[in-house]
Image (cartoon, rainbow, N blue to C red):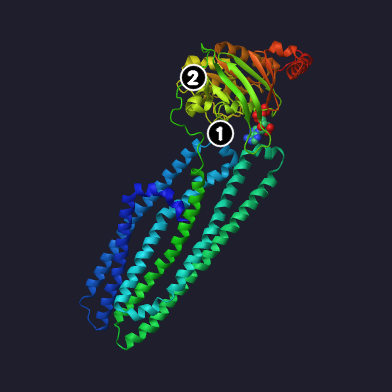
Amino acid sequence: MLREFRTLLPYLKKYRLNYLLGLAFLVTVDAAQLAIPQFVRRAVDDLSLGRTGEIPGFALAIVGVAAVVASGRFLWRYFLHGAARRIEVELRDRLFDHFMVLPSSFYQKNKIGDLMARSTNDLHAIRMASSMGLVTFVDGVFMSAAILVIMTARNPRITLYTILPLIPITVLILVFGKMVGARFKRVQELYSKLSDVVQETMTGIRVVKSFVKEEVFAARFSGANDEYRDASMGLAKIFGFFFPFIAFLSGLTTLILLWAGGGAVIENRMSPGDITALLAYLEMLIWPMIGAGFTVNMIQRGATSLKRVNEILDEKPEAADHPGTLRIVPSCGAPADGTAALEFRSLTFSYPEAREPALRDLSLAVPGGTTLGILGRIGSGKSTLLKLLPRMLEPPEGTVFLAGRDVRDYELETLRKTFGFVPQDTFLFSDTVRANILFAAPDLGPELFDRVTAISAIDRDVNDFPAGWDTIVGEKGLTLSGGQKQRVAIARALAADPEILVFDDALSAVDTETEERILKALLAWRRGRTNLIISNRVSTLRHADRIAVLEGGALAQYGTHEELLALEGFYSEIARLQALVLDSAGRSRHG
Ligand code: ADP
Ligand code: MG
């Protein structure tokens, strides 16, 4: 269990001064508290003998000690809670940085709600463990040891009887720790599940509403919420039993003291002041005892939560760069030695969970400065092929080459900057249209901005946007049409001026006339550079220099538009079908 705390070690080291000062003040407060019964004892003894001369002195001393206790409490809280809050923030930063380097596959395996719960709820439990857990631990050990020493020094026999109930209390605390650990783990898991349900419902709210499934989702949430309540209640019940029971057992110590000590006072073997002081110390002993229970509980929760956070931190970041990685963005224009800009060599690729490979023995070269079109049915492996290039998926060694070098030899950042991607299902951030276009090229000048927005044909839509280029889109703003989104995404990719431009069916929601315009302008602008364009429209593909047809993950056909048209096969078949559709649509194409 304590192994999980290794993650906190560097932070505890960093804030060791805070911790040392905090603990010093904590012990000072404890020691000062221990002095109070001594003054009470002497005052009571004086009173029982009828002497009052020194009483005001004792009273003043008690007030003085109380002042020390008050300021000491403020100071240990300041140092210990301060350090714990800072550690929480830094650990959360570290977690987020780690989220940024985890591969896409990690996000396919984990639910967003769960990850959010771990970065908030669990970090809260870790903070409690690294402040209050420590405080109650030190407090408990120091106070109970000191009190036992003081009591034994003055009345060894009576102390021995009195502390007998402490043995079952200790056993109870250990059992309690185990029970809390298991239950708390369940509570945190159910909290994650609750976050998942909320996150998924909100993300899919349009689908939920359009299929009138609100009640189903409300019931699903309600179920998760009830489960969470039951688990939390299970945890609270242990507390509800534990603390009163401890208080009861420590009440027994008072009973024993009155019985054993009372006799001693009557027989004059003990002064009235002594028994008053002992009662005060016993009263003080209850808190560290309960505190020990708290410690066990908080350390357990902290360990459980740290385990959940460590699970993420232990996830391997994507493709660690080994020394000697290439850090130069390769020129993929038209290398003099004829090296292909891109090449696949007998590439076979399978997804980890899949039974069949998504790509089989695929060999294909894309000469620099040319445009490759890719056609294939849904599921034929087109997107997979493109994702292997920037290592969104990790290709096997010696299968995917960029400018003559294995893509695995490049530094990841260099590699990814070589490509400008327009993915199949694009994502725009909740920001202005302008900021979305400038996402990868913040310093783009106004001329180039006009140029890329003209090529992607998004410029004519700007008049329809309420605030022009400064219109906010995405979750918090205007909802763009599918075609508008695609064109913003194209402008974003063009703005980065990548060596290799990659379209994954990026024009599917744009009408054919606009598509024609975009492609003409685009290919003119990209002359002499390399482009990959997935499309299922022959009207798009015929602009490409070469076309590859994928079937079931394998390369079925390869050639120019004219060559493939002349051959019997998937390409000419699709071309015929689409020509028929175009003919029947005639001039009534919508714009
Ligand atoms: P396309 O883009 O041509 O429609 P994909 O490359 O997306 O095809 O998919 C190729 C095959 O790989 C399909 O059979 C698909 O089900 C499978 N596939 C795609 N993504 C994953 C994934 N993340 N895990 C497992 N299988 C996948
Ligand atoms: Mg696809």
- On the image, which quarter does residue 293 sit in? bottom left
What is the residue that sits farthest to the bottom in this orientation? Answer: 267
Name the residue carrying label 1: 476
Question: Position of 483 compared to 60: left or right?
Answer: right
Other residues around mark 1 within 10 Å, as few (<14) / some (14–19) / many (≥20): few
Residue 251 appears in the picture as rendered: yes
Give the label, 1 or 2, closer to the camera: 2
Residue 310: image x %, image y %? 49, 47
Which amino acid does the dot numbered 2 rest on? Pro
> x%, y% of residue 480?
61, 27
Q: What residue type is labelled 1?
A: Lys
Q: Do the residues labelled 1 and 2 touch (CB within 8 Å)?
A: no
Quarter-of-image position of residue 555: top right
Q: Nearer the viewer, residue 199 or 501?
A: 501
* Point 46% across, 27% down: residue: 325
- Give how far across and how far down residue 23 sits, in percent: 33, 57
Residue 460 visible? The answer is no
Along the polypeptide, which appears first: circle 1 or circle 2? Answer: 2
Tell me: residue 498, above or below residue 324.
above
Residue pictured at 44% horizontal, 66% vertical: 290
Q: Which residue is label 2 attached to?
A: 330
Residue that appears at 39% across and 81% down: 258
